[in-house]
Image: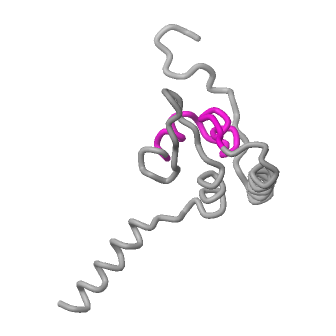
Amino acid sequence: MARNELFDDLRTFREPLDDALRKKAIDDLFLKAKYGLKFFYTLREACAILHSSYDEMNTLIRFYLLDVAAFREAYRVPWWSLAEYLIDPEDNLEGELDECLRTRYRQAG
């Protein structure tokens, strides 16, 4: 890495998560959980599954879009949280609640 550079390599390319890749990831998560192979994923594995960077993963965690469990000093992402996010990444319950309250307040006032 060049000195004072922000990113290691700007040429790295992450394939976007399209519908086929999303469905395959969901199926893999369900099968591994069903057969008891894997219930929790490291942050690095979760980044690979979601095709996201480590910073994007931390943002998802900080905004409560992904659940994590702390095992000693390491964070693990449960399979159901990954599957839930993959099924509907646009699920924004807090935003929907705010919108509902705003519309009801306008109707009452």
Q: Whole-percent x and y of residue 4? A: 46, 12
Q: Is residue 32 left or right of residue 39?
A: right
Where, by quadrant of the figure, is residue 9 drawn? top right
**In which quarter of the view is residue 23 placed?**
bottom right
Q: Position of residue 30 (x, y in %)?
A: 76, 56
| Residue 25 drawn in magenta | no
Seen from the viewer's position, the closer of residues 12 and 79 is 79
- Across and down, in percent, residue 3 comes to 50, 8
* Quarter in which the N terminus is drawn: top right
Instruction: Give how far across and how far down residue 53 sits, in percent.
Output: 58, 36
Q: What residue is shown at x 47% (from left), y 64% (from top)?
A: 92
- For the C terminus, the image quarter is bottom left
**Picture layout, residue 83 above or below residue 99:** above
Tell me the magenta residue range: 40-60
Residue shown at 63% from the left, 55% from the top = 80
Q: Main secondary structure of the magenta part?
A: helix
Identify the residue shown where x is 62% and y is 26%.
Answer: 10
Q: Is residue 58 magenta?
A: yes
Q: Residue furthest top?
A: 3
Looking at this view, is 48 or 79 the one in front? 79
Residue that appears at 65% across and 39% down: 41
